Amino acid sequence: MPRPKSAIALDEVHWGALKTLFPYLLEFKRAVILALACLVGAKLASTGMPFILKHIVDGLDGEGGAAAAIALPLGLLLAYGAVRFSSVLFGELRDTVFGRVTERAQRRVGLEVFEHLHRLDLDFHLDRRTGGLSRDIERGNAGIGFLMRFMVFNIVPTLVEIVMVAGLLWWNYSYLFALLVLGAVVVYIGFSVVATEWRTRFVRELNRAESRSSSRSVDSLLNYETVKYFGNEEHEAGHYDRELAHWEQARRKNRLSLFGLNIGQAVIIALAMTGAMILAAFNVTRGAMTVGDFVLINAFMMQIFIPLNFLGFVYRELKGALANIEKMFSLLKAKPAIEDKADAPDLEIRAGRIEFDDVRFGYGEDREILKGIRFTVEPQQKVAIVGASGAGKSTLFKLLFRFYDAGAGRIRIDGRDIRDVNQRSLRSAIGVVPQEAVLFNQSILENVRYGRVDASDEEVMEVIRHAQLAEFIEQLPEGAATMVGERGLKFSGGEKQRVAIARALLKRPPIMVFDEATSSLDSHSERGILASLQQIARKQTTLVIAHRLSTVVDADVILVMDRGEIVERGSHAELLANDSHYASLWQLQQQERGVETVSTNL
Ligand SMILES: Nc1ncnc2c1ncn2[C@@H]1O[C@H](COP(=O)(O)OP(=O)(O)OP(=O)(O)O)[C@@H](O)[C@H]1O
């Protein structure tokens, strides 16, 4: 069934967001009440102004004698000035007082959403680009500011004022004035809503054109080096110009439609004003009204229509603001896939024994990644996991860290199922050096200290030495205070890995997980770090994923994984003794190393 046209606007407006915001208003009850009082004061003052103006004009006709003709209007003029000033003062006071309520609401909601996003699971974050998320929060917060300012103190009071003025005109003069005002306002609002809806498509087109041209330019500039490698500057400029041409066209349509809206509104206002003035003039000539009444009616009409002029804009922005707020609150409704059981206790580590008991897992329904994994890491043992790319090695760690829960089977630490303890204590017991180290855009020192924020300077320096970072830091002009750039982009892969190792060491967890933690290091640095780690790891249970087998020859047990299964297990010597997959892999890597050594010697 086709939807009636007029319904399109209203059912797209997310009024529910208004309700969600209400509790935040209650926090500063006194400020809200004060702001409302200021609002009433401002409105009373502005409604009083035309009446004073009327008396001034009527007093100027000289009927009460020369002295009265000067004294009366002078007193009224002073009163007029005072009332006009108090109307502005009350308005400003209202905005200032209520600003505090708005800002506090924005802060509360911003923090709530931020904390909630950190509670959500890894999949939620993998599915969304962080840039998009922070844009949602930013827009939602701006929406709250807009809504509070315009809805509470602009739209509703303006509508109340219109009804009040219509009532006053009816009471003092004739119902015809009231009808004229209300009729004009209804037509004006109706026209503005319909025209704004009609314009939405042009506004959307413009927004799309804007974001397409800007993402095109960002993408092109980010790929600066690639553009240069292929000498494609002209190709890029051509693409960008085509996007700009779209933008230019969309902008023109947008401007023309705005012209139509503004002219339409102006016609309605002009007709209403003229009608009211004709009616008033007619009454003045009949002697039913004074010239002062004529001025009063004119002043009221101006007073009502000026704020109405913003209505088209406010309505469009309001729709956007409500949708943005709703989007931000919908983030709060997202439930984390991994949740602690009610009153889940802390994980108490006694020895640090890890057990994978017939663990099965798939990221989706359709593909099983881990197919019945069973192994045990005894306390303080070092177990290495090797195998082809995509075999499921990193997935094992993600389950241990509870980024995901196993589909079947159990993972236990010191005999306790990790699903029965709280995530915070589980995660604080495990130190991870991930495959791809990502750094905060802060100094190196702050990045290392992130491992344990209350660590002393000596402790930080010690792990920096263990991770072979000291020499590198010394070479930097600003030493440990050097900023690492966004996501650590100013550092090489190996340097980032060393920072990641240092901060994991600083955490001093009873269980350590290294996911190809030294893969970006050259053989020399790798050997140095491994020697350091070996020393430290003696007191910890350690799991290591490695591609270069030479880094795990000292492991107590090596597990060889293939397509989600453990196909071989044993120490380096045991595995070599058999005609195993591991042995052939080892031989292959030894040969490669031989070639490498020869080529570096050449
Ligand atoms: N979040 C995810 N959603 C869907 N599939 C995933 C996800 N993460 C990993 N996979 C898939 O799961 C499989 C196992 O990935 P995993 O990272 O555990 O392999 P890996 O053995 O560590 O590989 P590599 O040695 O290359 O790091 C891969 O085929 C990968 O494409």
Image (cartoon, rainbow, N blue to C red):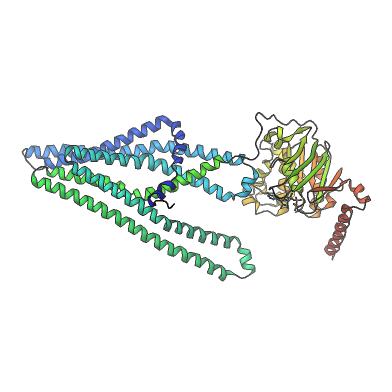
**What residue do we see at 54% from left, 38% from top?**
112
Residue furthest to the front in view is 1
Tell me residue 494's x, y (percent): 73, 53
Q: Is residue 244 above or below residue 161?
A: below
Kindly identify the residue that appears in the image at 86 percent across and 55 percent down.
585
User: Where does the C terminus fall, quadrant-wise?
Assistant: bottom right
Number of numbered discs visible in the structure rendering: 0
Q: Position of residue 162 (x, y in %)?
A: 27, 41
Q: Would residue 571 be found to the left or right of residue 404 on screen?
A: right
602 or 128: which is nearer to us? Answer: 128
Q: Nearer the viewer, residue 366 or 107?
A: 366
Query: Does residue 467 appear anywhere in the picture?
Result: no
Q: Is residue 22 visible?
A: yes
Judging depth in this view, the residue of 589 and 539 nearest the camera is: 589
Quarter of image, res 426: top right
The location of residue 94, given as percent across then percent down, is: 36, 37
- Give the side of residue 123 with respect to residue 156, left or right: right
Q: Outermost residue, right direction?
A: 577
Residue beneath the point at 80% across and 52% down: 547
Left or right of residue 548, residue 440 in this image: left
263 sits left or right of 283 in the view: right
- At a point 48% along the width and 65% down the height, the residue shown is 244
Q: Position of residue 470 (x, y in %)?
A: 73, 47
